[in-house]
């Protein structure tokens, strides 16, 4: 009975690892590939000539920045999962129980919170319409606009 319980335990861990790998590792690899391709494409692009080219370049840079933020925020989760997978394959058990039990949860929460907090800042910095809308909603209009209304 003990053997089947241990084998079932390892089976659950293997399924859990495959599940986590499919949720975090595969998307991270795809997004990293997209980031590398976008960065190379932006670096190789010739001088910007037309207004349309300028807009396309600005959009491309914005997308690349969002991708970079996502990757940067998710690095701890990916590293944790790689180390956890290695520990399962080698039967190495870390001595720090907190990391073993709560590491992935902490990584997931922190990475999502940081990424979610940075995204509106990027929107604000990169998108003129969003910046204008935000200033209007917050009633931070310039003093010149107040003078012209008086």
Image (tube, rainbow, N blue to C red):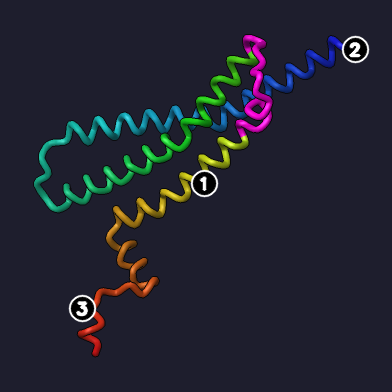
What whole-number distance in Å separates the C-alpha atoms at marks 1 and 3? 37 Å
Q: Mark 3 or mark 2, which is nearer the start of the sequence?
A: 2
In the image, 115: left or right of 41? right
From mark 1 to mark 2, how far is it between C-alphas? 43 Å
Observer-side mark, 2 or 3, equals: 3
**Mark 3: few/some/many CA within 10 Å (<14, 14-19, 20+):** few
Check if mark 1's residue and mark 3's residue have beta carbons within 8 Å: no
Q: Are marks 1 and 2 in contact (CB under 8 Å)?
A: no
Q: Position of residue 45 (x, y in %)?
A: 17, 35
Q: Residues within 10 Å of mark 1 (few under 14, many from 20)?
A: few
Furthest residue to the right? Answer: 1
Write the start and end of the magenta stretch as one range: 89-104
Asked if one can make out residue 150 in the rendered structure from this viewpoint, the answer is yes
Query: Which numbered tag is attached to residue 113?
Result: 1
Quadrant in which the N terminus is drawn: top right
Point 79% across, 17% down: residue: 8
User: What residue is shown with label 3?
Assistant: 144
Name the residue tied to disc 2.
Answer: 1
């Amino acid at each position: 009975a003990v053997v089947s319980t241990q084998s079932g335990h390892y089976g659950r861990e293997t399924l859990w690892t495959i599940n986590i790998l499919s949720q975090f590792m595969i998307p991270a690899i795809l997004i990293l590939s997209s980031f590398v391709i976008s960065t190379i494409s932006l670096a190789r692009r010739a001088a910007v000539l037309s207004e349309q080219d300028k807009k396309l370049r600005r959009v491309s840079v914005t997308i690349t920045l969002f991708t970079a933020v996502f990757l940067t925020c998710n690095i701890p989760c990916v590293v944790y999962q790689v180390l956890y997978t290695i520990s399962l394959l080698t039967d190495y058990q870390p001595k720090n129980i907190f990391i073993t039990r709560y590491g992935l949860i902490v990584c997931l929460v922190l990475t999502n919170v940081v990424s979610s907090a940075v995204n509106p800042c990027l929107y604000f910095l990169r998108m003129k319409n969003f910046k204008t809308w935000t200033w209007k909603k917050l009633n931070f209009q310039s003093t010149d606009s107040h003078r012209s209304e008086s």
